[in-house]
Amino acid sequence: MKQIEKWLQDNNITYCTAKWGNPDYFNDGFTVCGLMVTFDFYQDRDAPAKMSAFERYMGRKRAYNCEYYKYGAGWWIRVLTAADAPKLEEHEKRVSDAVEAFWQAEHARRQAMQKAS
């Protein structure tokens, strides 16, 4: 990750270190660390060229996983190690499934209360 950070600094690309995961939901302390790289096409006229260079550079890095997210005038990219990416995806799915199960149970409880009254 340090090599990627150095490359980003050398190429004047905006990034920050970030943590993903919800350590409090299951009280398991789960988080993964990575980089959040942003390309704002509105503020930086060189953003398309920088993004192309970044994609070429990361194409050679098989040990890392990049997830692309579009926002208004650009992209932000989540960079994680190839080992952490599936762990985060599985954790997010567990949280999503738990939230869905909670709301289904809550809806059923409210429907039962409404029928009882």
Image: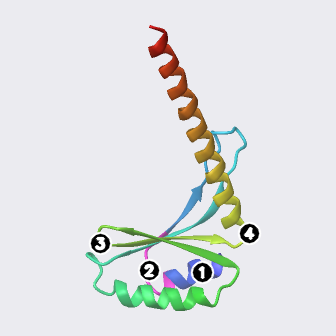
Residue at 60% x, 37% y is 101
- How far apart marks 3 and 4 lie (CA) works out to 31 Å
Amino acid tagged 3: Ala
- For mark 2, what is the residue? 13
Circle 1 sits in a helix, a strand or a loop, which is it? helix
Residue 28 picture quarter? top right
Q: Position of residue 109 (x, y in %)?
A: 54, 21
- How far apart marks 3 and 2 lie (CA) works out to 16 Å
Badge 1 density bin: few <14, some 14–19, many ≥20, Cα 10 Å: some
> Mark 4 or mark 2: which comes first in sequence?
2
Quadrant location, the C terminus: top left
Amino acid tagged 2: Ile
- Colour scheme of the picture: rainbow
Badge 4 density bin: few <14, some 14–19, many ≥20, Cα 10 Å: few
Amino acid tagged 1: Ile
- Residue 40 is inside the magenta segment: no
Circle 2 sits in a helix, a strand or a loop, which is it? loop
**31 or 97: nearer the viewer:** 97
- For mark 1, what is the residue? 4
> Mark 3 or mark 4: which comes first in sequence?
3
In this view, the mark in front (3 or 2): 3
Circle 3 sits in a helix, a strand or a loop, which is it? loop
Residue 26 picture quarter? top right
Residue at 43% x, 83% y is 12
The part of the chain drawn in magenta is: 9-15
- Residue 11 is inside the magenta segment: yes
- For mark 3, what is the residue? 73
